[in-house]
Amino acid sequence: MTVTEQRGAHRADAPTPPPAWQPRTDPASLLPDAEPHRVLGTAAADHTDPALLRRLYAEVVRGRRYNAQATALTKQGRLAVYPSTTGQEAAEVAAALVLQERDWLFPSYRDTLAAVARGLDPVEALTLLRGDRHTGYDPREHRIAPLCTPLATQLPHAVGLAHAARLKGDDVVALAMVGDGGTSEGDFHEALNFAAVWQAPVVFLVQNNGYAISVPLAKQTAAPSLAHKAVGYGMPGRLVDGNDALAMHEVLSDAVARARGGGGPTLIEAVTYRMDAHTNADDATRYRDDAEVEAWRGHDPVLLLERELTRRGLIDEDGIQAVRDDAETMAAALRERMNQDPALDPMDLFTHVYAEQTSQLREQAAQLRAELEAEAEAAGTDRSPEGGQA
């Protein structure tokens, strides 16, 4: 028996249930555009600020060199692993530049470039990936949450911080970054739901680079786009060309301003491409061919900016070379500093586990200290550890 066939279903005096099924929000205003938003190569580019265009170009070129240098450091044994963002620099840089000093950035493990573009020391940004320390920098000082290796777990944290800041009356926006693979995690959906219900001042940036390691997007979702997922949670979804630095800056700026003004969260999908392998431990040739990579090289974010600057007469060959030289200077300094052996204290293993050490930790610390002192005595050198609590 169907619902309409049940007793009393057709009675004129039957009570009508409240319209709880009706939309709480007009879905039309939340839907993303059919095509990714673009600025470079369109008439709108003529009206953009030349200073912003030059800065985006300098930061993207610098980011490209940073990626290449970090990848080289893995081959030299100076870095354990590096998830490159070569090809994704426009989205990384724009995410950093749209934030004010008081705002917070919540990066994933692939977003070291965004942290560096926000002002973090490049060596500190790589310290976690080097395996030297727990984070490598003070999150509170830089307003950058720890680089997050577990997929999407930083997203609920971003929502919580943004919601708490609003309750306190602090004018703070959180920008949370995640890859397309992270959208298949439960944390992604929970974060979006909480953010929309609370109208938290948070912006979600999904960098859709085509693959979750080796898994193509079509194997993860049947949605028209990842930006469409916003509608189900009651927030706007924006689809943008992730290699178009001006478009990224524009869309992210609008979303941050909307969040700061009390308009709630936005989900932004940046359609981009990872030129390099997933990490230095990955063989990308096993799941994609060279023709696909070459097709994306024609839509390189560095090339797109260079064309626009040249077309408008805002840069010449000398200017281009000056930007490249500056990036090379940064890479040389990074290389020199990363080639220095860090001074590590084994007792730091116990320093940041709990605010007050447990009896088990104190026992383990005392055992390690005794072993280190015994080694130093046997070697006839003063190698006793510094710091730490026994």
Image (cartoon, rainbow, N blue to C red):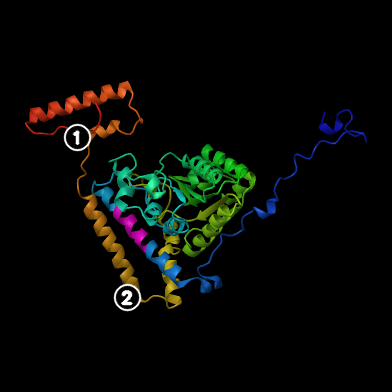
Decide which of 37, 282 is in the foreground and name it: 37
The percent coordinates of residue 146 (x first, y second) are: 39, 43
Residue at image x 33%, y 23%? 358
Residue at image x 42%, y 76%? 314
In the rendered image, residue 210 lying in the magenta stretch gets the answer no
Q: How many residues crowd mark 2 within 10 Å: few (<14), some (14–19), many (20+)?
A: few
The percent coordinates of residue 336 (x first, y second) are: 21, 54
The percent coordinates of residue 9 (x first, y second) are: 87, 32
Q: Secondary structure at mark 2?
A: helix
Q: Quadrant of the C terminus?
A: top left
Name the residue tied to disc 1: 386
Residue 143 visible within the image: yes
Q: Which residues are magenta?
A: 61-70
**Location of residue 53 with respect to 248 vertically, above or below:** below
**Location of residue 34 with respect to 124 vertically, above or below:** below
* Left or right relative to 229: residue 172: left
Which three-letter amino acid code belongs to the residue tagged 2?
Asp
Residue at image x 41%, y 53%? 114
